[in-house]
Amino acid sequence: MMSARSSSQKTTAKQVNQSIVRRHRPDFQIVLFMGILMLIGLVVLYAISPARVELINQGGYGLDQAHFMQKQILYLAIGLLGFGLSASIAIGWWKTNAEKILIAGFAACLLLAVLGLFLNGGIIIETGGATRWFNFGIGSFQPAELLKFGMLLFIAAFLGRRIQQNKVNSVNDTLIPLGALIGLASLFIIVFQKDLGTGITLFGMIAAMLVVAQLSARLFILCGIIAVGAGILLIATSPHRIDRVMTFLNPDAVDASSYHINQAAIALGSGGLTGKGLGQSVQAFGYLPEAVNDSIFAILGETFGFIGVSIILVLFLMLLRRLLFVIDRLADPTMQLVVAGVFGLIVTHVAVNIGAMTGVFPLTGVTLPFLSFGGTSLLFMMLGLGLVFQISRYTSHGAVTQEERSSKDEVALRRRRVGRSRYASSRSY
């Protein structure tokens, strides 16, 4: 009698375990909102590309009028290829190779730092005293983005193991190793490459992962205080960062330091309610610095007006809502943390970029996802969303509670209807 009952429980547990991870149709709304944002960015770049090329050609370069759009199409093609690869390669492969990808990111950053000491030009791009890119002729590569992607995968796997071991709130086992890793990454990105903006997006990504990992409020606040203190120290020891903060605190000053934010305010204000329309931008003709990448939101405001940028913000919100939907319906903590990291990355990029253009935050060199001109940031953002797209195949029909994730009683999961997958098929993960 006892043997039959034990056999029945094992069979039930096995069925429940299979149903929890059963493969089904992915969340195509992720692709929909991502695609709409990319198309908007491409249209705007097409409209302002002649203005930017005319300005550059004054230096005798002879670029084609559609130069920026053509390059952006190339970047989008590479990004879509990355999205397809990350959406098709098994999650297990990413987990197994997370450490190798992280090491590759550190190695690329170290190589950039070493070459930057001896080379100026050629394969190394140095701007404003900062060495952040490799130059490969047809495009550039920013190794900090590879490092961020490696951090996303490695920390998700690391915290996933700590969740299973019930050691998330352990200072020695979790926070100290994690803090050492973040400190090393910050050294390469913020100190060596002088890129505080990318460092902020890294911290935003990790903060979202810690929230989902359910780090205790006391430890989370402590980590936040340490991060803010480190940020203040990094600003206080860098003259150009001090200048940006002073400009932020005194935006009405009429001098070279406040020129960028003043031109962004002019662009947003001149757009009014409905915008000037495509091809009618004035700021794109050399008035607004970095008009095609970091300052693209100001150009969007000038072109589409308040209504247009509000629609763009709604598209971002809808994309982020889909990511929260996926997080809420995953039983695997590592998968949860990957999606949470991508969520935090997009939120931080959007908030910091728009905040800088509207005067809410000091100016930082952070792109607006899927809309700004550029290749490396777009590639790794789409690699991350490709992972989310694949992970969305393994969500449950309803929300999964933390108790259900940590419970060892799989039969209880079945009674709470967690196991049944949406659009379940006969194929198992």
Image (cartoon, rainbow, N blue to C red):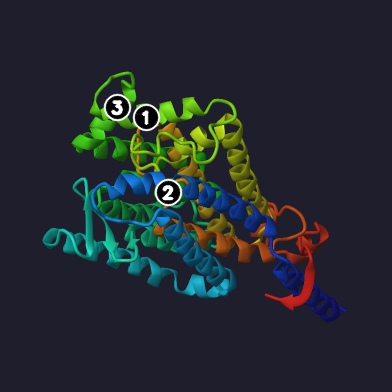
Secondary structure under tag 2 reads helix
Residue flagged by tag 1: what amino acid is it? Gln
Q: Residue 262 appears at what percent x and percent y?
A: 36, 26
Precedes in sequence: disc 1 or disc 2: 2
Residue underneath mark 2 = 49
Q: Residue 413 appears at what percent x and percent y?
A: 76, 61
Residue flagged by tag 3: what amino acid is it? Ser
> From the viewer's perspective, is residue 400 above or below residue 52?
below
Q: From this viewpoint, which residue is outermost toward the left?
A: 118
Q: Is residue 425 left or right of residue 94?
A: right
Secondary structure under tag 1 reads helix
Mark 1 nearby-residue class (10 Å; few <14, some 14–19, many ≥20):
some
What's the residue at 20%, 38% (across, down)?
238
Secondary structure under tag 3 reads helix
Residue underneath mark 1 = 263
Residue underneath mark 3 = 258
How many dots with numbers? 3
Q: Quadrant of residue 106?
A: bottom left
- Name the front one of labels 3 and 2: 2
Asked if the residue under mark 2 is in contact with the one under mark 1, i.e. CB atoms within 8 Å, the reply is no
Precedes in sequence: disc 3 or disc 1: 3
